[in-house]
Amino acid sequence: MGSKTICSECSATGGTASETFQFNWSPVHNLLQNNLPPPRRFQVKSACQTIHEIQRDLAEVEEAITHMRSVFKRLLSKRMALQDYLAAHKGLISPLRRLPAETIGEIFIHALPHLPFELDGSPPPLLFQLVCRRWKEVACSTPALWACVSLNLQKHFTNHDIAVATACLARSGQLPLTVSLGSRGYHPMAAAGVHTALRLLMAHCERWRTVHMMYVPLDVLEQLEEVRGRLSLKRLYLVTGGDEDSQFPIKAFSIAPELRKFVSSSGNYSDMVTSRALHLPWNTLTSLEIDKRRAREIWPILLDCSSLVDLQVMIDSGSDMTNVPPVYFPCLRTLSLTLPESSTLLSKFIAPVLQEAHFTVSGKSWQDEDRTDPWHMHSGLNALLMRAKHTLNKLALQVAEECCFGPQDIVPCLSFLPSSTALAFSDNINTMLLLHAGSKIPPAPYSN
């Protein structure tokens, strides 16, 4: 048989060396170019012999390929091992390795998610323990990483809560604790008397500085009565669903002489806060935040908060009261109110040292009556600004697009403010004031 180069794709002769292979021609090679059967018996025998030889050669090639694949696989493994070994040696001279453990621990602290967070799955600080041995040692020896304890208190989280509480209490040393109780939604809680993790935390209640409570049922609040009088609490955050209202007083936090900040959010207008079932040292608070409630329900609370420095309240539309007594805040520096356009309550706030005022005016509801006088007089803004005209250095006003505001509703009261007062208005108010200033026409009397 002759020796020819055959294309590996189409069996054609010729081509470059890189695209062809050296084959020995079979005696019946010329018959491959047509569709006719071999005309002679010896040609059939030659074809069968060639098939046997090619199959033998093919088996040898397959064996060689298997060997080369094995070699290639070993080379890949060796490459990976060398890369890992290289990375390890590069790590010897990396800046991170030279950082003191205290610095790495501080970085870990800044990487913590916003509070409250749950130690479930692999969030920090649990994630830090999985990176390398040194990071695990740093994480476990940094008490501030474990000073935030979050308990879910649901039935299927009981064992998890116990593990979290035990680890955090052991690793946080004697640092002040931030405690989060409850879940982020309505879920069945464990039955009363089985909150082993909560009892572990209550044994260290003297270390509580911040407490977040989210949809905590009344039976848990009753258990918390044991901490009464033992707290050095400074901040309390409460989220209720509206169905936790209690007919009995909740006094767990009633004796907390260091409590300064209280933030309340609810899915209902009425809850344990507005019903006054939750007892707090209201007169020692310096910061109070309450979400959307009716004025008649939050007014008694405001009357008790005489030491406030910062107040943020959302007042519901249609809940205004004209006969409420004034509230006197001798120390109030920042006032942030969200109120309906029809509200007349601003004149009831007496804050002689007020420095910043932020007002958000929402549209009126169907039950609100149309006002017949300029908004700054109707709302009482002019009276409030008159009292604070010597101290106010910032006034922010956000007005909903659906509100009926004209220059006469705002411009006259601005004369009460000193020139150093910073103003921040919503875009619609800015546009209105620019048009008014460009027209050089005094504000027209108010008319519907």
Image: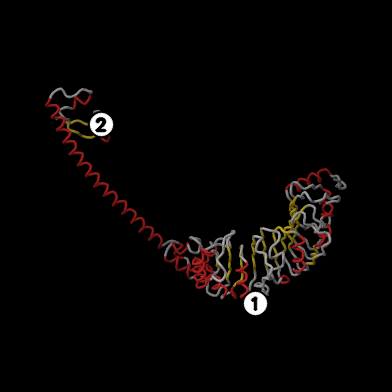
On the image, the x and y values in percent for residue 223 come to 60, 72
State how the image is colored: secondary structure
Residue highlighted by disc 1: 229
Q: Is residue 305 left or right of residue 157?
A: right
On the image, the x and y values in percent for residue 45 come to 13, 29
* Image: 12 above or below 147: above
Q: Is residue 284 left or right of residue 194?
A: right
Q: Is residue 80 left or right of residue 409?
A: left
Name the amino acid type tagged 1: Gly
Q: How far, Cα to Cα, is label 1 from label 2?
A: 93 Å
* Image: 203 above or below 295: below
1 or 2: mark nearer the eye: 1
The front one of 338 and 87 is 338
Name the amino acid type tagged 2: Cys
Residue drawn where x is 75% and y is 55% of the image = 339
Which numbered disc, 1 or 2, marks the residue that appears first in the sequence? Answer: 2
Residue highlighted by disc 2: 7
* Image: 197 above or below 397: below
Residue drawn where x is 52% and y is 74% of the image = 173
Residue drawn where x is 71% and y is 59% of the image = 269
SS of the residue under disc 1: loop
On the image, the x and y values in percent for residue 306 come to 76, 69
**Hey, which quadrant is residue 250 in on the image?**
bottom right
**Hey, which quadrant is residue 359 in on the image?**
bottom right
**Hey, which quadrant is residue 26 in on the image?**
top left
On the image, the x and y values in percent for residue 331 come to 76, 68
Q: Residue furthest left?
A: 42
SS of the residue under disc 2: strand
